[in-house]
Image (spheres, grey):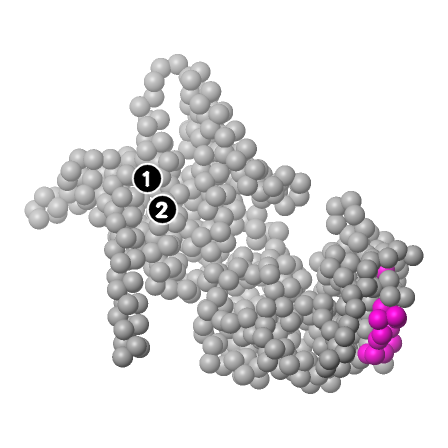
Amino acid sequence: METLVKLESVSAGYGNEVILKDADLAIEEQDFIGVVGPNGGGKSTLVKVIVGLLKPLSGKIIFHPGHDDPGHRCLIGYLPQFTQFDRKFPISVLDVVLSGIADGRKPFKRFSDKEVNQALEIIAQMGISAIAKENIGELSGGQMQRVFLCRAIISHPKLLILDEPNTFVDNKFENDLYQTLKDLNKKMAIVMVSHDIGTITSYVKTIACVNRELHYHKSNIITEQQLAAYNCPIQIIAHGEVPHTILETHNH
Amino acid sequence: MDSLIELFGYSFFQNAILAALFTSISCGIVGAYIVAKRIVFISGGITHASFGGIGIGYFFGFSPLLGAMLFSVMSALGIEYLSKKSEIREDSVIAILWSLGMAIGIIFIFLTPGYSTNLMSYLFGNILTVSKLNIYLLGSLCIVLVGIFYFMYKTILFVAFDEEFARAIKLPVEFTNYLMITLVALTIVLNIRVVGIILVISLLTIPQTIAGIYSKDFKKIILLSIIIGFAGSFFGLLISYYFNIPSGATIIFFMVVLFILAKIIKSLFVSISLKKQLK
């Protein structure tokens, strides 16, 4: 098992606030890590640090040899949070997917037929060939998320990072998505941020609880007591009729 | 009809047609970008900030066009830099530079002895008096724009669509943004003489809005905007000539009429297709 990305006591934040403190995490091949934690706890901050959008204030990130460049396109595929897209922007599904293999070092390069075919192939795999020429704004939430997943995996990354892929999508898409991710997991490691721990536990292999600090839980079964011990007071939406409690934030 | 052919014989009119062509190409391309990226307000700021350069040009006796170019590019880069790197909100930065440019312009024009009739053509524009130099510059700008959009089309599109993702895949986001905002500034300044500071923003938005009614494809929006822009300025020019009214205002008025017509035609098509579906 090779380590793809390794965080060594990484701290990060915005402006004058440290949001993530002394995080240690090793992401290895075949991993499927669910990142959970309360809002504002630093889940997205963690993702941004790994993807290379945010420089850590202290600590070290070690990337897989040959990919020491943060966010190198061959190493990491990235599906950002949903809210930041302009739905009225005049861009087609095909172009959005192609942007996943745009080469930052060659801004003047145009896409070859081979690359366009590669994009069409991945669009077909995701079952959205019918909308390949459509404008991004005309799609439903689930279709849009599929497009962004295509964009994230078209470069055949070794690590796929998804930031809350289940917001604004219906249940059917959510289940389809988790099945797709399970298949993708055979080829790449996955780190998925989610606010909904109950649903993801049956798909992920391990859990990282992020609330200012990062606690890595080497199993996909987690109890509320354990979450509380990790200082990660989030609710577990259990399957079935098991009642759940919402724990208050407590400092210790 | 004869008088129309006669009109084309005049060199001032040929110049005006050439200006109209370059105007529609440059504004078609740049306008599609600013409308898609929702930075129309930034462009408004750049336009008005350039007035400072015009005032300084008048006062110190060098080309107001040159002053305007300098001021607009500086303020464009300033807006891009300050809104990204400082704590001040982007729209506030724009408003400050917008009014600073106007204030400097007013002060220097007030201090300049005598009254310059030319000043009016900067405020309200006149496509018939666009200088040779201005037309050459506008033509060169068109070549640069077409070249950059041809070779960097995808990069421009991806950076404008999703900056954060573009950054994550290491596209040259900052370079692209600074380059584009500079091109926006130059396009605005070189088109000021055509319709004036007050109206130039409409050249960058009305054709694009009409094009946007019929297409959601960035490339097609650019092409349609150029065609609509040229039709608008050509017929606007003719109407202004025959009725002897200001050309800049006529062009814009004609374009707004086109917009309303386009909107009506589109909604007719929509209601027909809805009725068909209900049957």
| Horizontal relation, residue B221 to residue A71: left or right | left
In the rendered image, the quadrant that contains the N terminus of chain A is: bottom right
Residue at (57, 84) in percent of width and height = A125
Chain letter, disc 1 residue: B
Residue at (52, 50) in percent of width and height = B180
Residue at (78, 52) in percent of width and height = A13
Q: Residue furthest top?
A: B113
Q: Position of residue A194 (x, y in %)?
A: 72, 69
| Horizontal relation, residue A137 to residue A147: left or right | left
Q: Which residue is mark 2?
A: B203
Q: Position of residue A108 (x, y in %)?
A: 55, 62
- Asked if labels 2 and 1 touch by Cβ distance under 8 angstroms, the answer is yes
In the rendered image, the quadrant that contains the C terminus of chain A is: bottom right
Per the image, label 1 sits on a secondary structure element best described as: helix
- Graded by Cα atoms within 10 Å as few (under 14), some (14 to 19) or many (20 or more), the crowding at tag 2 reads many
**In-front residue for pair B60/B171:** B171
Q: Amino acid at mark 1?
A: Val
- The disc placed on residue B194 is 1
| Horizontal relation, residue B235 to residue B53: left or right | left
Asked whether A155 falls inside the magenta stretch, the response is no
